[in-house]
Structure formats: C-alpha cells, structure tokens
Amino acid sequence: RKEVEQDPGPFNVPEGATVAFNCTYSNSASQSFFWYRQDCRKEPKLLMSVYSSGNEDGRFTAQLNRASQYISLLIRDSKLSDSATYLCVVIITGGFKTIFGAGTRLFVKA
Amino acid sequence: EAGVTQSPTHLIKTRGQQATLRCSPISGHTSVYWYQQALGLGLQFLLWYDEGEERNRGNFPPRFSGRQFPNYSSELNVNALELEDSALYLCASSLRGSGAYNEQFFGPGTRLTVL
C-alpha cells in the first residue's frame, strides 16, 4: 500500500463546477499536509497548507481529518486555469520525510 | 528575489555514464531536497540535505548520491546510468528553522534522458 494515495483521475468538469479531491495517508506520524499544483511540464507550486481546523483561500478549501487519515481539496466555481495536476503532500514528524501523492489530474472545460 | 535554479535544463547521457545535476536554493534557505519524477509518475523523494549534511534518503540505490556545499547549493550525482533513470529531476529548497511546516519551493527541473 502506498503511503499517500490519490485518485489519479482525470476529473473532467465544466467551468463553474465544484470538484473535490481526496488524499489518504497511512503513516500516523504524519505531521504536516499541503496541496501543491503542477502544470504540465512545470515544477510543483504550493497551493495551500492544510490545517485540522480547515482553511479556505478564495475558491479553494482544504480539510484534514486525522482520525480517518485523509485530506481533501474542494475547488468551487472552477476556472479553465484550474486545469492542472493536484499533488497531496505529507510530511512525517520532524520533517524527515516528505511524501508526494501521485497527483490528481483536473481538466476544466469551457 | 531569485527562485531555485537548476542546471542543466536538459541532459542526455548513454547507459553506464555518470550524470551531475546542480541546484542553487533560494537565498537564506538551508535545506535542499531532490526528487525524481518519471513520466506519468508522481514525485519520488531522493535526498534531503540540510546545513551540509544528508538528513534522509529515499528508496534509491547507492548510485544516486549527492552533496551540499557550504553555500547551500547542491549536486546530485547518478552513476552507472540506466535507461529507467530517464526522468525529470526536481530540486526544492526550504527554510530549515520552521521545522516540519516548511514550504518547499521547486526549481524548474533537469530533464535527464538516458539512451
């Protein structure tokens, strides 16, 4: 079993749709969580950190459920520019290990 | 402020050769991470350096090695190249002091092709 698992997609949604991605992790020593975005043939860039209390940044909302060991990303009012691969990232306690999920591909269509 | 830089952008080698990839972190960052991203696959953690020391390594054979210099720049060396080493190699840097909450900033990567 992979330490961090994501649905690879692709998710094909129309503009304006709401889409949600989940990511599960297996290491209970996981301490920090992030969502990164990676455009085709580009480097990953931080989208947002994920906190237990949940956090929102504009159209993006991230949630962490430690009991069930998953994090989620919700994108509201999808834009064409949201088309990308979304990477779930887990950092193990002490920062000794950073684990990236394989990514979920999102295509937003006009 | 300059971001993470990597060189070369592209590198073509043949099987059995050695490859050296370079990374310069953001000014003030002491941690450097190396990742391998093979086509269609996720990022696989290779190495983490901080303050000149190797802090952790991923599940890669010993022919993948590296070092971090006093100016915090880093080098990744891949010996005895194999065809399956063809991938995008990404370097990231972060502030060490903020513990596990470090945001990692990525460079544009080096695309290594092994023929």
Image: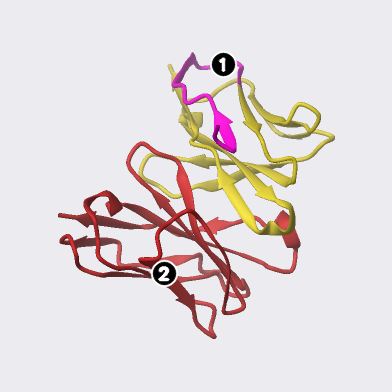
Q: Is residue B109 left or right of residue B104?
A: left
Q: Is residue B59 left or right of residue B79?
A: right
Query: Which one is in front, A40 or B113?
Result: B113
Residue range (magenta): A1-20
For mark 1, give the secondary structure. Answer: loop
Residue labelled with disc 1: A16
Asked whether residue B108 appears in the rendered view, the answer is: no
**Residue shown at 61%/16% (left/top)?**
A18
Q: Is residue A79 left or right of residue A31?
A: left
Does A18 appear in magenta?
A: yes
Residue labelled with disc 2: B65
Location of residue B89 in the rendering, given as x and y in whole percent from the top left corner: 38, 56
Query: Which one is in front, A11 or B44?
Result: B44
In the rendered view, would you say A7 is above or below B94?
A: above
Find residue B13 and name its label.
none
For mark 2, give the secondary structure. Answer: strand
Same subunit, tags 1 and 2: no
Location of residue B74 in the rendering, given as x and y in whole percent from the top left corner: 46, 74
In what quadrant of the picture does the N terminus of chain B appear?
A: bottom right
